[in-house]
Image (cartoon, rainbow, N blue to C red):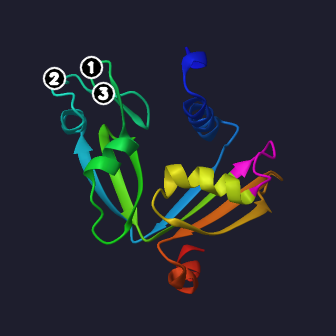
Amino acid sequence: MAFFLDKKVRVIIVFLFLLISPVFSKVEYKTYELRTQKFSFQDVCLKMGKPHSIMASAYNHVWVNCMNTKVSAQQFCLKHFVPSKGEFLRGVILDNTVICSEGMAARVSMECPDRSCQNKKISCLKLKKFFAYDLSLLSSSLSYSKRGWQKINCHFSQNEKLEPKLNSLLL
């Protein structure tokens, strides 16, 4: 079935699989001025045009099952969550609710045991889609974890003027 999907969708699916696979054993995620809003699965299904989804459930940590129709938590949040003072970060499923997050800055660090993070800017832009959707990439760097694995470090912010203040808070 995956062969019939558009190439962009296949790339996203592969990246999500790699992101949650045990090979990428550790992801560190920190935010600055985080605010979240929770939505029930029934509310998500209703607002996304699936009104008769009384048996809605989590398909995984990013998709809601609305009576055999998958709805993306990220897409729901992009359509129905209005950030109050920060920028939209991500939409995820936790404890049987969809959680939409906003913040002013974020830092994401991830181990890359197979050296898949060679191009630090591209790697950070891929992570941005899942952890800091509306923020700008401020800086990216490569380091090594205690296990000797390559580690990508990405800093995202609303604007560049926050950089000195945020570096001291996020580090």
User: How far apart in space, not on screen, are marks 3 and 1 (Cα)?
Assistant: 8 Å
Residue sitting at the far right? 148
Residue at mark 1: 67
Q: Could you tell me the amino acid type at mark 3?
A: Ser
Residue 52 in the figure: left or right of residue 104: left
Q: Quadrant of the N terminus?
A: top right
Which-is-in-front pick, marks 3 and 1?
1
Span highlighted in magenta in the image: 111-119
Q: Quadrant of the C terminus?
A: bottom right
The residue positioned 80% from the left and 42% from the top of the image is 114
Mark 2 burial class by Cα count in 10 Å: few <14, some 14-19, many 20+: few
Residue sitting at the far front? 6
Relative depth, front residue between 109 and 118: 118
Q: Earlier in the sequence, mark 2 or mark 3?
A: 2
The residue positioned 55% from the left and 73% from the top of the image is 170
Quadrant position of residue 25: top right
- Confirm or deny contact between disc 3 and disc 1 (CB under 8 A): no
Which element is circle 1 on? loop
Relative depth, front residue between 79 and 162: 79
Dominant secondary structure, magenta:
loop
Which element is circle 2 on? loop
User: How far apart in space, not on screen, are marks 1 and 2 (Cα)?
Assistant: 8 Å
Q: Could you tell me the amino acid type at mark 1?
A: Met
Q: Earlier in the sequence, mark 1 or mark 2?
A: 2
User: How far apart in space, not on screen, are marks 2 and 3 (Cα)?
Assistant: 13 Å
The residue positioned 25% from the left and 49% from the top of the image is 80
Numbered label attached to residue 57 = 3
Residue at mark 2: 52
- Confirm or deny contact between disc 1 and disc 2 (CB under 8 A): yes
The residue positioned 56% from the left and 81% from the top of the image is 163
Q: Earlier in the sequence, mark 3 or mark 1?
A: 3
Q: Is residue 27 visible?
A: no
